[in-house]
Amino acid sequence: MARRISATMPCFLSRSSIFMATMVDVAIAVPQTMSIRFLRVKLSPPFFRAKPGLPRDWSPFRRTPTRVAETAYAALAGIPAIVFIPAGKIAAGKLSQALAYGARTLQVAGDFDDAMALVQRVCDELGVYLLNSLNPFRLEGQKSIVFEIVQGLGWQPPDWIVLPAGNLGNTAAFGKALHELHALGLIDRLPRLAAVQAEGANPFYQSYLGGFEQPVTVRAETIATAIRIGAPVSYGRAVRSLSWTNGAVTQVSDNEIMDAKAVVDGAGIGCEPASAASVAGARRLVAEGVIRPGQRVVAVLTGNVLKDPGATVDYHTGAWADARFANRPQPVAADLDAVRDLIEGIL
């Protein structure tokens, strides 16, 4: 698998001033005539807004496991926040942010889907404001990622946009954004969406194989905690997005995810495991002939490398039997000659 940065594009700062993305070209074991770009989302889109009129002693939103940008915005606005997480099921880097920003963090006995079912009841019966993929205003904010993609490419859409797929909020939002851009005449054709799931958390992929005749649920398990979801709440809207864009769904193994992550990290970009699913999925679709030579592909990276440092350390220190790009730390004596021997050939 090649690792080579071929070009770097500037950062794009949206009018909201709270969303930035970086796009870079990276060669990653695909035909040389193919262009694959990573879109790294550095801060969450502006889908948090304080809701006037809500009592200050209420929590105006909850956020299901992992992403915690909303807790930062809530802290800035002085609004109480509640975060529901499945106990022991999210990465420490994500949990630490929710705690640091002062959110009331509730650890639910169960997995993501158990927490999701509980929080819907909490919001319905206790008057808490819901802010996850079920909230249509949040999806409107997530559309801005697609606006940044096409803007960064000079309003010439890529052939494919490949993204991780868990709760399917991004899949739903991306299709809506593309549909609207095309209807407004801002792009002359629709890119195809490719949703990538982990093999151990693949309900959408299974539904895709069945022609989306009915939703599928699974008991999810994968190293990619951000997409460890067995009953995605945005299923219907995601199906509509794929219909609009003639999209595809694929699945990748945890090993493929971690190898792709190592390539992204080694290129100086960095991402969490779930983000690397998009890159692993792009490689899978190339190998299957779905993505063809000469096509332009944008792979979306949704989470920072520091979101799950434990997974990174495990990969590079021998916890994975087949870590193709492991960068193992080397012990060395506190001696100049010993260091010289180890770094010979680097200097």
Image (cartoon, grey):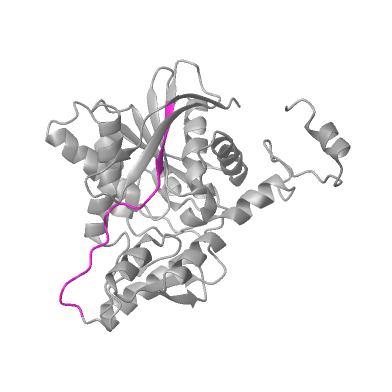
Q: What residue appears at the point 77 percent right and 25 percent down from the top-left corner?
A: 345
Q: What residue appears at the point 19 percent right and 78 percent down from the top-left corner?
A: 54
Residue 346 in magenta stretch: no
**Which quarter of the figure has residue 119?**
bottom left
**Image position, residue 303 (x, y; %):** 45, 49
Q: Nearer the viewer, residue 8 or 65?
A: 8
Q: What residue appears at the point 73 percent right and 28 percent down from the top-left corner?
A: 346
Residue 128 appears anywhere in the view:
yes
Image quadrant in which the C terminus is located: top right
Residue 154 as seen in the image, left or right of residue 321: left
Q: Nearer the viewer, residue 342 or 253?
A: 342
Q: Main secondary structure of the magenta part?
A: loop
Q: Is residue 257 above or below residue 133?
A: above
**Image position, residue 189 (x, y; %):** 22, 27
What is the span of residues highlighted in magenta in the rendered image?
36-54
Report the number of discs. Answer: 0
Q: Nearer the viewer, residue 78 or 297?
A: 78
Residue 58 as seen in the image, left or right of residue 301: left
Q: What residue appears at the point 40 percent right and 68 percent down from the top-left corner?
A: 116
Residue 114 appears anywhere in the view:
no
**Image position, residue 26 (x, y; %):** 49, 27
Residue 44 in magenta stretch: yes
